[in-house]
Image (cartoon, coloured by chain):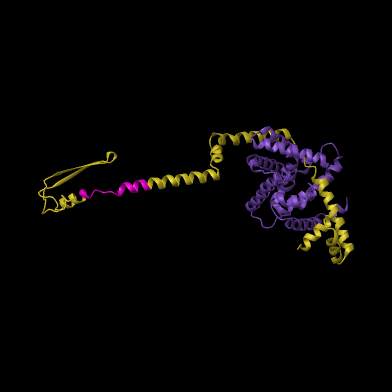
Chain colours: A purple, B yellow
């Protein structure tokens, strides 16, 4: 985690970068992209479980951010603002995919068939083959479990547990109330606890 | 008023304090089970963070390169007019243009209406024309009018008049 001083420095330079972007400086935007591309990609990947789709959605999100950067007023951090765009793009995509698939509740059986092998995203040459296989299985279990959550529940649990965002930041990113965030978190956790209990109990 | 779900989530995440915390904990029927579930949620969170926090973006530079290309492509049509147009037609400008157009329209309408219904029509012309349409008085009469408004001059050219209206001389 960043200290308050480094956070303040990062915020100042980030605001400066945003101001330059608003003046049409694409190099400044490139710098912002470099700061957030990995986190944005990771967040989307954990929601859609496809490397290619995550890549495309991350691209779309940043392009949308560039097009609307002049509307950024600095009332929230750039980080929260970009996450709002990312969430809109990703949730919208998941909803459309669900409609095309003709499914009802989010069991996402269609998506699961398209899930890329987890080994693609795992660090290479750090673990022994049997360890990698075990982790790959765990990853698949987690992906399967997350696929059973609604897009909004996925977004909330990932922002809270992976990104460590505060309730109010999640609420801003999703454009909903803090109460809604807490409620979605409640149901997402309950569902994941039921689906993954044996996994986290045995680690 | 927070719902149970909201309070429970806040309690799990250590977001309750003071009176709210003590009241909530007092309301729990089985505190030991609640504490066990709190531990479960922490384990779940740790598992998710460990397993999902490693999704790395490969080819980061290519990602940025592709994005730069897309930004460049998307900015080309806007520079040629679309973007410039949308930037120029802001709401205040639209209001000003609308108001100015309305004012021009009103001025033009008033001008045309005045032109169509001149306030100072010649009494003399009216009388002559009335006389012309009377076939008994002047069956072969023709009246032509030449008017130069700029110089405030009107010339009436009459032919075939057998008599003039009785009140003409008086005017």
In which quadrant of the rendered view does residue B86 lie? top right
Q: Main secondary structure of the magenta part?
A: helix
Residue B146 lies, with reference to residue A178, above or below; the image says: above
Question: Which residue ends up furthest to the front in the rendered image?
Answer: B170
Q: How many marks?
A: 0
User: Can residue B126 be seen in the rendering of this structure?
Assistant: yes
Residue at (41, 46) in percent of width and height: B105
Q: Quadrant of the N terminus of chain A?
A: top right
Q: Position of residue A53 (x, y in %)?
A: 69, 43
Q: Nearer the viewer, residue B71 or A70?
A: A70
Who is closer to the viewer here, A5 or A85?
A5
Residue B77: quarter of image: top right
Residue B12, horizontal then vertical, whole percent: 83, 57
Whether residue A157 is situated above or below residue B55 in the rendered picture = below
Look at the image and say whether residue B119 sits in the magenta stretch.
Answer: yes
Inspect the magenta stretch and tell me whether residue B68 lies in it: no
Coordinates of residue B171 in the picture (x, y in percent): 19, 50
Q: For this rendering, which residue is in front, B119 or A175? A: B119
- Residue A123: x and y in percent read 81, 39
Q: Which residues are magenta?
A: B110-125
- Residue reaching furthest to the right: B32
Does residue B57 appear in the picture of this structure?
A: no
């Amino acid at each position: 985690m960043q200290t308050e001083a480094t956070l303040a420095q990062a915020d100042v330079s980030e605001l400066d970068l945003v101001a330059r972007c608003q003046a049409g400086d694409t190099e400044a935007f490139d710098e912002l992209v470099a700061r957030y591309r990995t986190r944005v990609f990771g967040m989307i990947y954990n929601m859609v479980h496809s490397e290619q789709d995550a890549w495309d959605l991350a691209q779309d999100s940043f392009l949308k951010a560039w097009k609307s950067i002049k509307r950024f007023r600095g009332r929230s951090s750039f980080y929260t603002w970009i996450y709002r765009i990312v969430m809109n793009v990703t949730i919208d995509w998941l909803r459309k995919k669900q409609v095309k698939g003709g499914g009802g509740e989010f069991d996402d059986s269609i998506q699961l068939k398209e899930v890329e092998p987890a080994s693609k995203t795992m660090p290479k040459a750090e673990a022994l083959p049997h360890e990698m296989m075990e982790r790959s299985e765990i990853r698949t279990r987690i992906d399967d479990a997350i696929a059973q959550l609604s897009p909004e529940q996925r977004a909330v649990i990932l922002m809270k547990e992976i990104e460590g965002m505060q309730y109010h930041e999640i609420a801003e990113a999703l454009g909903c109330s803090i109460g809604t965030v807490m409620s979605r978190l409640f149901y997402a956790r309950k569902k994941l606890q039921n689906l993954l209990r044996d996994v986290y109990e045995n680690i | 008023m927070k719902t149970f779900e909201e309070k429970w989530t806040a309690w799990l995440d250590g977001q309750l304090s003071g009176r709210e915390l003590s009241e909530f904990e007092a309301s729990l029927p089985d505190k030991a089970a609640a504490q066990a579930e709190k531990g479960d949620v922490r384990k779940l969170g740790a598992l998710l963070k460990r397993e999902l926090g490693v999704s790395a973006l490969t080819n980061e530079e290519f990602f940025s390169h592709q994005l730069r290309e897309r930004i460049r492509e998307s900015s080309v049509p806007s520079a040629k007019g679309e973007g410039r147009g949308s930037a120029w037609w802001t709401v205040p400008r639209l209001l000003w243009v609308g108001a100015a157009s309305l004012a021009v329209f009103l001025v033009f309408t008033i001008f045309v209406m005045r032109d169509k219904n001149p306030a100072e029509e010649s009494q003399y012309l009216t009388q002559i024309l009335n006389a012309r349409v009377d076939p008994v008085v002047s069956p072969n009469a023709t009246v032509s009018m030449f008017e130069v408004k700029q110089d405030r001059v009107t010339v009436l050219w009459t032919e075939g008049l057998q008599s003039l209206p009785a009140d003409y001389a008086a005017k």
